[in-house]
Image (cartoon, rainbow, N blue to C red):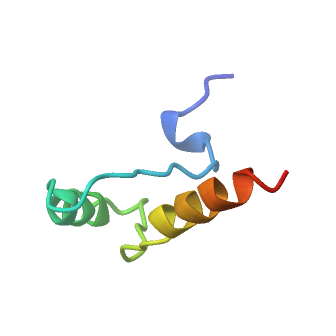
Amino acid sequence: MATSVFSSVRPVFVLACPRSGTTLLHLMLHAHPRIAPPLETRFVLPVLRTRARLRGLA
């Protein structure tokens, strides 16, 4: 039985720096009928800062 490239249901995360073409990438992905990119989130930097701050407590 052949497996389609689109048969995977696992999420894919795309991370990028600000002002690096992320809006264009978002629009290109949004144009595909089987891809639903969420709005931009800014959670990565606060999480990394908190992790670095708490690393010394362990």
Q: Is residue 17 above or below residue 7?
A: below
Residue 54: x and y in percent read 72, 60
Front-most of residues 12 and 36: 12
Residue 46: x and y in percent read 51, 69
Please give the name of the residue rendered at 26% of the width and 63% of the height, measured from the top-left corner: 26
Looking at the rendered structure, the number of numbered marks drawn on it comes to: 0
In the picture as drawn, the residue positioned furthest to the right comes out as 58
In the picture as drawn, the residue positioned furthest to the bottom comes out as 39
Q: Quadrant of residue 39?
A: bottom left
Please give the name of the residue rendered at 51% of the width and 49% of the height, measured from the top-left corner: 12
Q: Is residue 31 above or below residue 10?
A: below
| Quadrant where the N terminus is found in the figure | top right
Front-most of residues 13 and 51: 51
Image side of residue 55 versus residue 4, left or right: right
In the picture as drawn, the residue positioned furthest to the top comes out as 1
Residue 41: x and y in percent read 42, 74
Front-most of residues 52 and 8: 52
Please give the name of the residue rendered at 39% of the width and 52% of the height, measured from the top-left corner: 15
Q: Quadrant of residue 27?
A: bottom left
Image side of residue 16 versus residue 54, left or right: left
Please give the name of the residue rendered at 22% of the width and 59% of the height, measured from the top-left corner: 22
